[in-house]
Image (cartoon, rainbow, N blue to C red):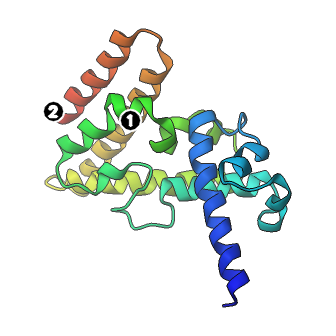
Amino acid sequence: MKRSKIEAAETRRRIVKTAAAEFRRKGINATGLNDVMAAAGLTHGGFYRHFASKDQLVAEACAAALGSDADASEVPACPALSKDDLEAILAEYLSADHRDNPSEGCALAGLGSELARSDEETRAAATDGVAKLVDVFAHHYGRTNPETARARALVAVSAMIGAITLSRIVTDPKLSTAILRCARKHLAAM
């Protein structure tokens, strides 16, 4: 591959990675192309050399953030999932650090309502991310039959994403902390 093609591919990866963080931090609709390109250290003019539209960037950034092209054990948006200990996963995911750093956290918790209103390609990337997340959790409930493990995984993933989302919404710090603590305690007991 020519040097310029390698550089172009690296630049594209940098834009996608930056967009994924910016979208989680500020939201998809509140993040303009100028914001993404500036955060990537580039000018707005170069955007269309890499992408046909913002929708294309959103879909690729969501796929990258959700690990749609990664192994089921590697979900970049939720790095704790590669650990074997379920309580450690819950403690890391349902933490004040995760709540307070949405640009580095789970894209599903940070962008869920916007992803629901996105185009088909972006929703497909989100669906793949959810499926992988559920598979990872089902593995942790492996001592039961596969159907029960999957059902528990669906509940756990839904509760975790919901708890992080609610903990970010509320303005009362005590309530926010209680949401995380109670969800963690309940899920650990499942």
Residue 189 marker: 2
Q: Position of residue 80 (x, y in %)?
A: 30, 49
Residue 109 in the figure: left or right of residue 139: right
For image coordinates 36% across by 43% down, the residue present is 154
Question: Which residue type carries mark 2?
Answer: Ala
Question: Which residue type carries mark 1?
Answer: His
Q: Is residue 190 visible?
A: no
For image coordinates 28% across by 26% down, the residue present is 183
Q: Quadrant of the N terminus?
A: bottom right
Ranked by sequence position, the earlier of labels 2 and 1 is 1
> For the residue labelled by badge 1, is the local secondary structure a helix, a strand or a loop?
helix
Q: Residues within 10 Å of mark 1 (few under 14, many from 20)?
A: some
Identify the image quadrant of residue 31.
top right
Q: Position of residue 173 (x, y in %)?
A: 38, 12
Q: Is residue 114 above or below residue 80?
A: above
Identify the image quadrant of residue 34.
top right
- Asked if the residue at tag 1 contacts the one at tag 2, i.e. Cβ–Cβ closer than 8 Å, the answer is no
Residue 144 marker: none
For image coordinates 39% across by 67% down, the residue present is 71
Nearest the eye: 155 or 178: 178
Q: Is residue 190 above or below residue 141?
A: above
Nearest the eye: 144 or 71: 71
Q: Is residue 94 above or below residue 125?
A: above
Q: Is residue 47 visible?
A: yes
> For the residue labelled by badge 2, is the local secondary structure a helix, a strand or a loop?
helix
**Residue that carries the numbered disc 1 in the rendered image:** 98
Q: Position of residue 57 (x, y in %)?
A: 71, 56
